């Protein structure tokens, strides 16, 4: 099993304080039996976060920052014929508009069901079709859009922008103009739409925009990859609930004690960096060094 752990280490002061309170004995023990295979040092402002870069590496997907073709991959998994077109993942979202900022709320907070999402999808679909774009429904939080302008359009992952001001994360350049215009048109359409009036009457957040990510042409993925992404740290990290994040880490660490869940490869991902460890045959000297050194998971996580 190839295990990827996103949001294993935070950058915020409160998050790093929570990290210092952790004891991860099973991860410590596991690391003494593994060898570092590679390290991907990056930037906290990159459009593609470390865990997405690591997943793309495992699957054999290629692309520059913000150009990993998740839209085409997810669409294929949802049964969409993606051959010959560039696809993007379109997520219905709520933009929280303040006096001096616009912030993106976690789409899970919308609690959109299939019927509700399809109603919004059908409301905005004519706007896309009038501009020559193909819009396809996949799931409540997975709509797909296809157009030639998406071939090399760099976009920020949702995991980069949830809970943050949007200024640094919006796509730019000539290929982004059409989608920015459509975003404005969708926002105007939904601002007073009866679907949102109904949601607000029920005390629910309105769906007032979309987020585009994962653009590019479909690429084949490696076959036979036993890939698992353990995302139990994701929601508490994005909501900056560090007590819940620490508890989730303790639960994840406990799961590593079970023989059947110990990975052959382990990738720990922070906000800047991902590092992979593999279970490989080690020399007696390497094993002795690891025992004497006493692998410290916390020290490693601090570098991510």
Image (spheres, rainbow, N blue to C red):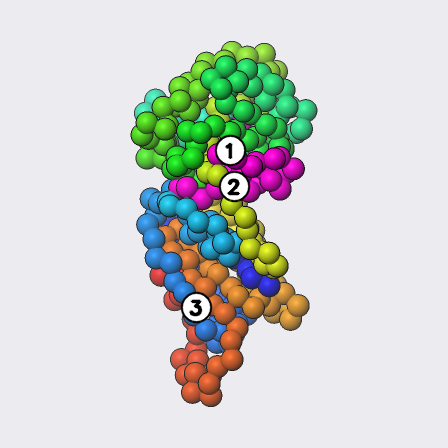
Residue 1 higher or lower than 159, as above or below: below
The tag earlier along the polypeptide, 1 or 2, is: 1
Nearest the eye: 36 or 106: 36
Give the number of marks: 3
Please state which of residues 25 and 184 is positioned toward the viewer in this rendering.
184
Question: Is disc 3 placed on a helix, strand or loop?
Answer: strand
Q: Are discs 1 and 2 less than 8 Å apart at CB?
A: yes
Which mark is nearer the camera, 1 or 3? 1
Compare residues 88 and 262 and report the one nearer the observer: 88
Q: For mark 2, give the secondary structure.
A: loop
Q: Nearer the viewer, residue 262 or 64?
A: 64
Would you say residue 243 is visible in this rendering?
Answer: no
Residue identified by numbered label 1: 85
Q: Is residue 25 left or right of residue 274?
A: right
What distance separates the C-alpha of mark 1 from that of mark 2? Answer: 8 Å
Name which residue lies at 34% across and 48% down.
44
Instruction: Say which residue appears at 47% left-offset and 88% top-offset.
Output: 284
Which residue is most to the right? Answer: 115
Query: Which quadrant of the rendered structure holds the C terminus?
Result: bottom left
Residue drawn at x 46%, y 38% as measured from the top left? 216
Report if residue 211 lies within the magenta region.
no
Real-space Cα distance between discs 3 and 2? 28 Å
The part of the image, by quadrant, that contains residue 98 is top left
Image height of 83 relative to 11, above or below? above
Instruction: Give x and y (percent) for residue 3.
Output: 55, 60
Q: Residue furthest bottom?
A: 284
Q: Residue 2: x, y in percent?
A: 56, 62
x 48%, y 76%: residue? 32
Q: Identify the residue under disc 3.
A: 37
Q: Which residue is mark 2?
A: 218
What is the x, y in percent for residue 298?
42, 65
Q: Residues within 10 Å of mark 1 (few under 14, many from 20)?
A: some
């Amino acid at each position: 099993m190839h295990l990827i752990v996103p949001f294993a280490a935070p950058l915020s002061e409160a998050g790093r304080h929570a990290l210092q309170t952790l004891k991860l004995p099973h991860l410590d023990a596991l690391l003494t039996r593994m060898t570092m295979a590679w390290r991907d040092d990056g930037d906290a402002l990159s459009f593609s976060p470390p865990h997405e870069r690591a997943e793309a590496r495992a699957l054999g997907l290629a692309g520059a920052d913000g150009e990993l073709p998740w839209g085409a991959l997810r669409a294929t998994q949802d049964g969409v014929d993606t051959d010959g077109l560039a696809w993007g993942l379109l997520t219905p979202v709520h933009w929280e508009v303040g006096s001096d900022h616009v912030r993106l709320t976690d789409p899970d907070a919308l609690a959109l069901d299939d019927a509700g999402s399809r109603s919004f999808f059908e409301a905005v679909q004519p706007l896309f079709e009038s501009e020559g774009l193909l819009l396809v429904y996949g799931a409540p939080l997975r709509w797909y859009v296809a157009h030639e302008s998406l071939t090399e359009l760099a976009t920020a992952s949702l995991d980069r922008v949830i809970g943050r001001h949007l200024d640094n994360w919006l796509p730019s350049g000539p290929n982004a103009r059409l989608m920015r215009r459509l975003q404005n048109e969708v926002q105007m359409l939904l601002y007073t739409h009866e679907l949102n009036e109904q949601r607000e009457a029920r005390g629910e957040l309105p769906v007032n925009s979309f987020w585009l990510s994962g653009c590019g042409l479909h690429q084949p993925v490696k076959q036979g990859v036993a890939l698992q992404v353990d995302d139990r740290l994701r929601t508490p990290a994005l909501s900056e609930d560090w007590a819940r994040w620490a508890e989730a880490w303790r639960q994840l660490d406990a799961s590593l004690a079970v023989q059947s869940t110990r990975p052959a490869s382990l990738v720990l991902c922070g906000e800047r960096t991902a590092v992979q460890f593999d279970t490989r045959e080690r020399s007696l000297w390497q094993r002795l060094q690891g025992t004497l050194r006493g692998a410290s998971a916390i020290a490693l996580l601090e570098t991510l």
